């Protein structure tokens, strides 16, 4: 795939031009990312905040609330986990369990606990646990991601 970037002050808005002999999964993925918003809304102390997707460490349900954990802050969301999952999957977020989705960029290390679950340690010091049901898929996604970055 050939990528050309032309940055110039004369352009008033960003434009993406894709040329290909056929539509592929990779092109569909690129188009989804280009069209979706790079922010989600989080709430803290009755105020709304725009949270950049790249800043999200994980999203999890805790005590009947949806919590958005970033490097420094925690926010709540009024959206349901499945709604955020639809958005975040486009950005290669990994589903850890029925109640948590993680940004693999923020994963520091992973280890298997005595009962076969994964303990996912994040660079901000927090920890989330996978359910055994998701272990195989998590490993596959993390390995696939690492292969793509080599």
Image: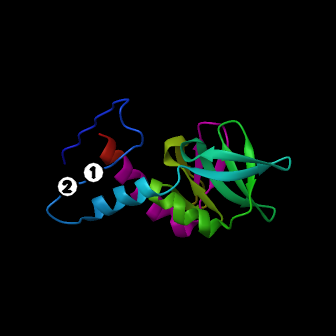
Question: What residue span does the magenta drawing correspond to?
Answer: 118-145
Q: Find disc 2 in the rendering and name its residue.
A: 19
Q: Nearer the viewer, residue 132 or 113?
A: 132
Image spot of residue 17 (x, y percent): 27, 51
**Disc 1: CA contacts within 10 A as few (<14), some (14-19) or many (>=20):** few
The answer to whether residue 64 is above or below residue 39 is: below
User: Which coloring applies here?
Assistant: rainbow
Residue 11 placement: quadrant: top left
What residue do we see at 74% from left, 49% from top? 75
- The answer to the question of whether label 1 and label 2 lie on touching residues, with beta carbons closer than 8 A, is yes
Name which residue lies at 59% across and 54% down: 113
- In the image, farthest residue toward the left: 21
Q: Magenta segment: does it hold 121?
A: yes
Query: CA separation, marks 1 and 2?
Result: 7 Å
Q: Foreground: 72 or 150?
A: 72
- The vertical placement of 107 against 114, above or below, is above
Q: Is residue 48 visible?
A: yes
Left or right: 66 with respect to 31? right
Q: Position of residue 87 (x, y in %)?
A: 53, 61
At mark 2, the secondary structure is: loop
Which of the 4 image quadrants contains residue 146? Answer: top left
Residue where numbered disc 1 is placed: 17
Secondary structure state at the residue bearing disc 1: loop
């Amino acid at each position: 795939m050939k990528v050309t970037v032309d940055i110039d002050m004369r352009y008033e808005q960003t434009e993406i031009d894709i040329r290909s002999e056929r539509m592929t999964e990779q092109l569909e993925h690129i188009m989804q990312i280009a069209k979706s918003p790079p922010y989600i809304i989080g709430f803290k102390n009755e105020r709304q905040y725009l949270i950049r997707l790249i800043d999200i460490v994980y999203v999890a349900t805790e005590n009947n609330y949806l919590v958005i954990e970033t490097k420094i802050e925690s926010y709540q969301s009024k959206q349901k986990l499945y709604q955020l999952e639809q958005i975040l999957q486009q950005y290669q977020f990994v589903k850890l369990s029925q109640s948590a989705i993680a940004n693999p960029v923020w994963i520091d290390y992973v280890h298997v606990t005595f009962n076969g679950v994964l303990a996912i340690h994040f660079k901000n010091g927090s920890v989330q646990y996978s359910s055994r049901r998701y272990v195989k898929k998590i490993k596959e996604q993390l390995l696939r991601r690492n292969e793509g970055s080599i």
